[in-house]
Image (tube, rainbow, N blue to C red):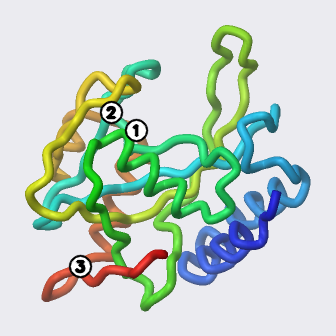
Amino acid sequence: MHRHHLNLLLERYAARWPAERELARRFLAFAAAHPDCLSRRCVPGHVTASAWILSPDGGSALLTHHEKLGRWLQLGGHVDGEARIELGALREAQEESGMARLRFVDWAGGAVVPLDLDVHGIPACGTEPAHDHWDVRFLLQAAAGQRLVVSAESRDLRWFTAAELAVVTGEESVLRLSQKARACTAGPGPLRHLAIC
């Protein structure tokens, strides 16, 4: 599987988040050691993609109450071989939210850069052994006038302000996403968006 684009995203991430260079290096090393890292067949773990989705006014973020894990989390999942990781995040966000019109927020000056990276363990389930998800996370914004549709993977979907998030979750990675998104979108004027083809 082609990992060039993933490596490019990780290098951009390290440049934009210098305090997290070591984490980006861990991702790069994992990808180098596992040619099939973009496939869920990669048994030790695999690359996943998720989206922190801002509301049309930018004041709230969309979370799903995950069916299997029973927690409020950002939307996302397996990339299933998609070399352009951000397209995997977009696909998962659309499928899990029911919204077709989602745009990447241009917070890094014209290039697609992950908002966050996170490695987390997934417990064994049925015939699937315990493994790690190497999650690459992106910042998106929903266009106005769309209805949310709860998918089979979710118990609920809901918009939360930053203050409400702290009440419904203590998940460090979710709260970190919220903080990073606020830092990257602070400032006057409407958010800019990237054209992703």
Quadrant housing the N terminus: bottom right
Residue at x 46%, y 66% (from the top left corner) = 115
| First in residue order: circle 3 vs circle 1 | 1
In the image, 103 versus 197, the foreground residue is: 197
Q: Is residue 16 left or right of residue 61?
A: right
User: Disc number at residue 171?
Assistant: 1
In the image, 36 versus 179, the foreground residue is: 36
Task: Tell me the CA gap for discs 2 and 1.
Answer: 9 Å
Q: Is residue 171 left or right of residue 129?
A: left
User: Disc number at residue 2?
Assistant: none
Residue at x 64%, y 40% (from the top left corner) = 133
Query: Residue beneath label 2, please?
Result: 72
Position above or below: 125 against 104: above
* Three-letter amino acid code at the position of disc 3: Ala
Give x and y (percent) for residue 92. Answer: 45, 46
Query: Residue beneath label 3, please?
Result: 186
Task: Tell me the CA gap for discs 3 and 1.
Answer: 23 Å
| First in residue order: circle 2 vs circle 1 | 2
Labels 2 & 1 near each other (Cβ < 8 A): yes
Residue at x 14%, y 52% (from the top left corner) = 146
Task: Tell me the CA gap for discs 2 and 3.
Answer: 24 Å
Position above or below: 75 against 168: below
Give x and y (percent) for residue 134. Answer: 66, 48
Q: Few, some or many C-alpha atoms within 10 Å of disc 2 (few <14, some 14-19, many ≥20)?
A: many
Task: Tell me the element at label 3.
Answer: loop
Position above or below: 45 against 24: above
